[in-house]
Amino acid sequence: MIDWIQTHYIEIIGAITGLVFLYLEIKQNIWLWPVGIITSALYIYIFFDTKFYADMSLQFYYLAVSVYGWWHWLHGAGGKSEGIPIIRLKSGLAIILLAITVAIFVLLVYVLINFTDSPVPYGDAFTTALSITATWMLARKIIDMWWLWMIINAVSLGLYIYKGLYPTSVLFFFYFTMSIVGYLQWKKHYISTSTSTSTST
């Protein structure tokens, strides 16, 4: 047991910080972004070591979006103390995001099949493409991103069990269940703020 912990301590720490990130995300706490930076840095190493190359590349994207999200949550509210509001995904933007996600998926599949030894190129590309879109939606506080995370986390759970990444599998089991909780919490907050806004006007 001790030998296993010593061998997998980076993955264990990454799983812990990932759970902290998820808690802060559900609570809409801005400290989720620096915690996300730490988690991404750890998983760059983990995914490189286990040949999840698309997921590894995704962590670099997470680092960049974490900086953007941190800035947007701080300054995107136009000086409002309560921060930026939760919004719904509009149909025009949804079509654009779908097209971008499909394009990213196709590109990643091509790269993974032809230039890497990834054992699960389609699954890796699928979760990576959706995660890119969902993380951008998180930075913009679009509530519908929770539906994407439910899909991502369910598929990722199966992939990580297949690869024997058991601490990460536990993390993604909690990710899946808590993504449902996150959606319900955000929806409750969205309805309450929408009601209060309409009442005040």
Image (cartoon, helix red, strand yellow):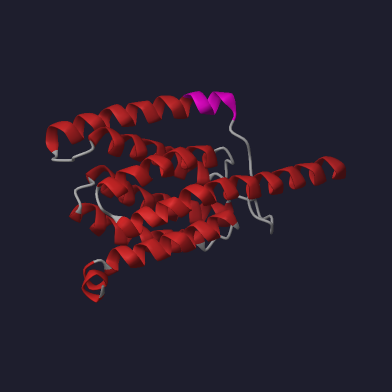
Count of marks, rendered view: 0
Q: Residue at x 55, y 24 (%)?
A: 92
Q: Residue at x 57, y 37 (%)?
A: 144
The percent coordinates of residue 137 (x first, y second) are 51, 41
Question: Was residue 55 drawn as part of the magenta stretch in this picture?
Answer: no
Main secondary-structure element of the magenta-colored stretch = helix
Q: Height in image: 113 above or below 117?
A: above
Which image quarter: residue 41?
bottom left
Residue 156 falls in which quadrant of the image? top left
Q: Position of residue 21 (x, y in %)?
A: 47, 59
* Quadrant of the frame with the N terminus: bottom left
The front one of 128 and 62 is: 128
- Where in the figure is residue 165, as x and y percent of width and height? 28, 55
Give the residue furthest to the bottom: 2
Residue 48 in sight from this viewpoint: yes
Q: Is residue 109 above or below residue 64?
A: above
Quadrant, the C terminus: top right
Does residue 201 appear anywhere in the picture?
no
Q: Position of residue 132 (x, y in %)?
A: 39, 40
Say left or right for 72 vs 59: right
Would residue 128 appear left or right of 178 to someone viewing this image? left
Relative vertical location of residue 18 with respect to residue 52 in this rendering, above or below: below
Q: In this rendered view, identify the residue nearer to me: 158 or 89.
A: 158
Residue visible at 46% across and 60% down in the picture: 19
Residue stretch rendered in magenta on the structure:
90-95
Q: Nearer the viewer, residue 39 or 84?
A: 39
